[in-house]
Image (cartoon, rainbow, N blue to C red):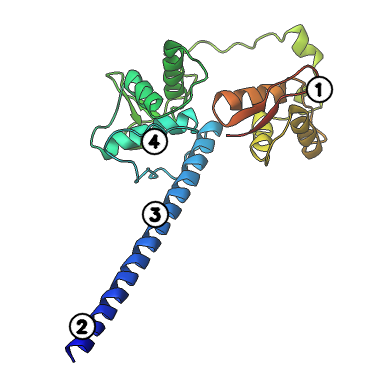
Amino acid sequence: MAVDRFSTADIFSNMNNDISNTIDVLTARVRAKEDEANKLKRLVNELCAEVGIQILFPGVSDQSAATGPIRSDEYYGQTLTAAIRNYLERRKTAGSGAASVSEIFSAIKEGGYKFESRNDENAKTSVGNALRKTSSIFHRLPNGNFGLLIWYPGAKAKPEDESPIKKRATKAKPSKREQSIPDAQSGQIRVTNAEIRDIVLAQQGEFKTSEIVAAVKAKYPTKELPEPKAPQMIFNLRKKGFLKEVSPRNGTTQAVYAKS
């Protein structure tokens, strides 16, 4: 009978272990799904910031960010805006908060963020520019440090082109080039930067500039698309980390791009 008792106990013990293992597996899946959802929310917030509207998920933070050493790949493959914000959220989780431009630069570089410039001073300047220009996400404190705007409910985002001195508005005389291009006043409406950006970011897989031009003209057949607008938008999105160059231009062969 003793043997039977121990056998039954072993059975229940094995069942408990199986249940515990199942719980661990499912918990890991839940956390992975939450991380994936947070990444999508942060991307939506970045796009909201790009077009100048209020972010939709102000409370999103990387709950998986550790308070220990920064991983060498923690910010690899992220946009500059995302890397800076994730680092600041990491500091907040660790109980630190706002940081200087130098601290932010050193941290995201350590975490694997790939700067376009190999010169540290130029790369640090790009961090400062991103912090100042994206005032709908980041906020500069009186001591020069930067934090997230959502941390300071009483603070307001400053317009990117804000100037301490308000100058009398004067109507600039259009250049000869501008006079030669039709606009809304002459009866033809131009495609906006936002419309071009939406089409570029909606691309799946690899694409070329000519394909973006064709897509814009197909969607807005009655609007004018100035020749440099699409290449300039692709250049700007590459600079901000939303796009990457898959293969460079080679003679008459256009460069190939894809979303980062």
Task: Provide the secondary structure element on which disc 2 rests.
Answer: helix
- Could you say which is closer to the camera, residue 244 or residue 7? 7
Camera-side residue of 22 and 94? 22
| Residue type beneath disc 1 | Ser
Q: Amino acid at mark 4?
A: Asn
Identify the residue position indicated by label 2 in the image. 6
Judge whether residue 5 can be spotted in this image. yes
Callout in the foreground (1, 2):
2
> Disc 3 or disc 2, which is closer to the eye?
2
- Give the foreground label among 4 and 2: 2
Under circle 3, the secondary element is helix
User: Which residue is pictured at 39% across the width and 35% down the height?
Assistant: 86
Mark 1 or 2 closer to N-term? 2
Q: Which residue is depicted at the point 27% across and 38% down?
A: 67
The image's mark for residue 186 is 1
Q: Secondary structure at mark 4?
A: helix
In the rendered image, which quarter is residue 15 located in?
bottom left
Q: What x and y, as percent, mark residue 16?
A: 29, 73
Viewer-nearest of labels 3 and 4?
A: 3
Residue denoted by label 3 = 31
Type of amino acid at the residue the image marks with label 2: Phe
Alpha-carbon distance for marks 4 and 2? 53 Å
Question: Cβ–Cβ below 8 Å for labels 4 and 2?
Answer: no
Q: What whole-number distance in Å separates the C-alpha atoms at marks 1 and 4? A: 47 Å
Q: Earlier in the sequence, mark 1 or mark 3?
A: 3
Residue at point 46% right, 30% down? 81
- Residue 8's spot in the image, x, y percent? 25, 84
Q: Compute the Cα span from label 3 to label 2.
A: 37 Å
Q: Is residue 237 above or below residue 12?
A: above
- Where 59 sits versus 82, above or below? below
* Left or right: 127, with 24 as reference point: right
